[in-house]
Image: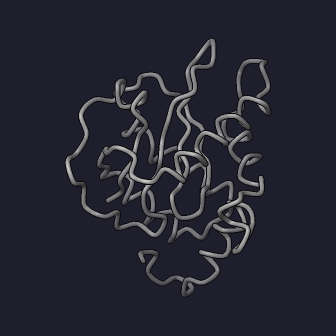
């Protein structure tokens, strides 16, 4: 089970939240999400609470965002060369998603910084390469990670490196 903690402006598009959601059971934990009002299509930006790993995906149709999230997560984890057992466990957990309000202002700040960087780095040509932009953003140094592994891609690699080979992917 995974909890997606959305900003107020995204919650207006997604619908009701789960009151007091249970803790995420996945290795990566909760995800924070907002939307980017880009034209011609709006984009959802999600960042992982534990690693700050960013994921950009199409927002429309907004009501199905949480159902589409596991497939986009699988694509992102494959692009980061995560082991198959980790991918499978994370995607399985993401298939059972709770929607909640944000609970950490620092992560909302990181979400806003990634939104700014995504706007700066995006190619205005269509079709927009959201996976490529997600990978580019994952290499950006992040203040909350300076005392650990500096960037989300390195934080993810270190987290996976510490797992037993082929062992359980859950924390």
Residue found 77% across the figure and 19% down from its top: 124
**Residue furthest top in the image:** 40
Q: Nearer the viewer, residue 87 or 162?
A: 162
**Spot occupied by residue 5 in the image (x, y as percentages of width and height):** 39, 46
Q: Quadrant of residue 148?
A: bottom right
User: Relative to 120, does residue 39 appear above or below in the rendering?
Assistant: above
Q: Is residue 22 left or right of residue 118?
A: left
Residue found 50% across the figure and 35% down from its top: 34
User: Relative to 69, does residue 31 appear above or below in the rendering?
Assistant: below
**Spot occupied by residue 35 in the image (x, y as percentages of width and height):** 52, 30
Q: Quadrant of the N terminus?
A: bottom left
**Spot occupied by residue 2 in the image (x, y as percentages of width and height):** 36, 56
Q: In which quarter of the image is the C terminus?
A: bottom left
Q: How many marks?
A: 0
Q: Nearer the viewer, residue 107 or 23?
A: 107
Residue found 62% across the figure and 12% down from its top: 40
Q: In this view, does 74 lie to the left or right of 20?
A: right
**Residue furthest front in the image:** 105
**Spot occupied by residue 118 in the image (x, y as percentages of width and height):** 71, 35
Residue found 65% across the figure and 62% down from its top: 144
**Colour pattern:** one colour
**Residue furthest bottom in the image:** 164
Q: In which quarter of the image is residue 58?
A: top right
């Amino acid at each position: 089970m995974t909890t997606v903690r959305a900003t107020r402006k995204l919650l207006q598009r997604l619908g009701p939240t789960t009151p007091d959601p249970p803790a995420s059971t996945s290795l990566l934990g909760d995800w924070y999400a907002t939307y980017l009002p880009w034209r011609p299509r709006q984009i959802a930006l999600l960042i992982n609470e534990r690693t700050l790993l960013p994921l950009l995906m199409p927002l429309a149709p907004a009501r199905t965002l949480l159902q589409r999230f596991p497939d986009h997560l699988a694509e992102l984890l494959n692009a980061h060369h995560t082991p198959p057992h980790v991918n499978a466990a994370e995607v399985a957990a993401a298939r059972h998603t709770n929607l909640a309000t944000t609970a950490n202002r620092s992560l909302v700040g990181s979400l806003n910084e990634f939104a700014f960087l995504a706007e700066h780095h995006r190619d205005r040509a269509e079709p927009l390469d959201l996976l490529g932009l997600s990978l580019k953003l994952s290499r950006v140094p992040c203040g909350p990670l300076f005392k650990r592994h500096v960037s989300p891609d390195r934080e993810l690699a270190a987290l996976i490196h510490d797992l037993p080979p082929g062992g359980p992917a859950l924390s």
